[in-house]
Amino acid sequence: MENFEVINPTRILFGKNQLFRLPELLRSFEVQKIMIVYGGGSVKQLGILDKLINELKGFDVFEFGGVEANPEYATLMDGVALAQKHEIDFFLAVGGGSVIDGVKFMSGALFYEGEPWDVLDKKEGCMFEKALPFGTVLTLPATGSEANSGAVISRRDLKQKRGMGGPLFFPKFSFCNPELVATLPKRQIANGIIDAYTHTLEQYLTFPSDNVLQERQAESILKTLIDIRGVIENPSDYKLASNLMWCATQALNGNLRCGVISDWATHMIGHELTAMYGIDHAQSLAIIAPRLFEHQFENKQEKLIQYGKRVWNLHGTDQTIAKLAIEKTEEFFQSLGVKTRISEYTSDYEGTDSAIMNVFLERGWVAIGERQAIRPEDVKSIVKSAY
Ligand code: NZQ
Ligand code: ZN
């Protein structure tokens, strides 16, 4: 097993009727001025905002709404200015991955003296050294952002989507109520399943590791997500919804990466599709993952066989099982109503392959994947094969 170090300080309050704990938790951080940050309005329409304001009597509460899906830098900078004006001492992110990621960025940008984009752009010597504490109320199970320290921020004017993170950016606490799945559009539930599934694959579908426990845990998450796919049709089924939510948290809270080598190439390429075409994050993964597995067939073969046997119960020769495992994965995404080709989302896709390859070259991402075997020209052919 590889050496590893792991920490996850986020307190998860999972289940129904937990929000009454909010004032007590906030008092434990000795904060008074809270800014609630939310997205395009679902939180208001669903009455979650009113509920929170009711719980927060006795605190000075400010609101900042309008954070977009794939949170936009300029919007978040408006939020930073407002937080500075009111001398906020705690952020409460109420939403899905976009709002939570947005708050992670805001919490660092608030104290940053230069241009915060430089941190996202990985300019030499530019980093967030301090962050405002924040908590989350999760409304969409997908990203695991409620239980990790990463964030992804977009700049539409530059067609860029960049990551950030570090130990400063773990939420202090996250309320995870699976009842909220009932209010989600089908598309977002399907996205949630695919994102959690792909997070698991990125840390599992590499090469066999000696961490037998982590392998089995990853397979359990994959099998559970397949088993509970009916949540799309029955989002108020609490058993299905709570298992989806817990899988999504577990898929990216840091456990699965312990003692194994991860991939993350599908995410790196997928982010570029979102940056270029606004394709939903999970949709971009459904487009890239099957093609990347085909391209990396030799490198991933051993693990594809294990995955095919243990997760999909496939039989036959090893070669057949490995091939079928990729087909099963793509069919699974399609069975959730998600399309797996770029041309099904945009007609303007000519040249996408070269454009993404050039972005990778500019950033010096010249050897990615678990074996650093994916070079910019491989990225180009993976993208082309996904047309
Ligand atoms: O904006 P509102 O009106 O709230 O609507 C949102 C949004 O339009 C809606 N929604 C959320 N909860 C709802 C709801 N609608 C009805 N009922 C509810 N309970 O759903 C839409 C999508 O929300 P969003 O937050 O964008 O989705 P998701 O959670 O999938 O987050 C995607 C973002 O997270 C990043 C992605 O790149 C993308 O920017 N990721 C973050 C990661 C992390 N921090 O660890 C890892 C991931 O790989 C991913 O990159
Ligand atoms: Zn993801």
Image (spheres, helix red, strand yellow):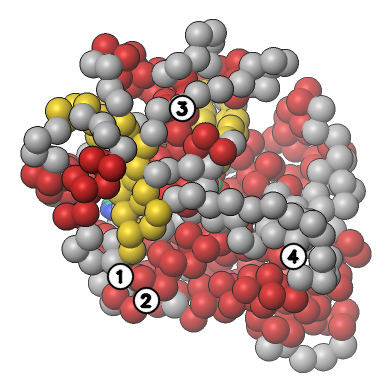
Marks 3 and 4, the one that precedes in the sequence: 3
Expressed as whole percent of the image width and height from the top left, the position of residue 124 reads 72, 16
Q: Which residue occupies 23% across, 16% down?
A: 86
Q: Amino acid at mark 4?
A: Leu
Q: Residues within 10 Å of mark 1 (few under 14, many from 20)?
A: many
* Labels 1, 4: front one: 4
Structural distance between the alpha carbons of marks 3 and 4: 34 Å
Label 4: which secondary element:
loop
Q: What residue do we see at 68% from left, 42% from top?
A: 268
Which SS class for mark 2?
helix
From the image, state whether disc 3 or disc 4 is nearer to you.
3
Residue tagged by mark 1? 235
Q: Which of the 4 image quadrants contains residue 319?
A: bottom right
Q: Which mark is residue 205?
A: 4
Disc sitting over residue 95 in the figure: none
Question: Can you identify the residue that label 2 sits on?
Answer: 240
User: For the point 54% across and 8% down, which residue is it?
Assistant: 114
From this view, report whether residue 263 is shown above or below residue 352. Answer: below
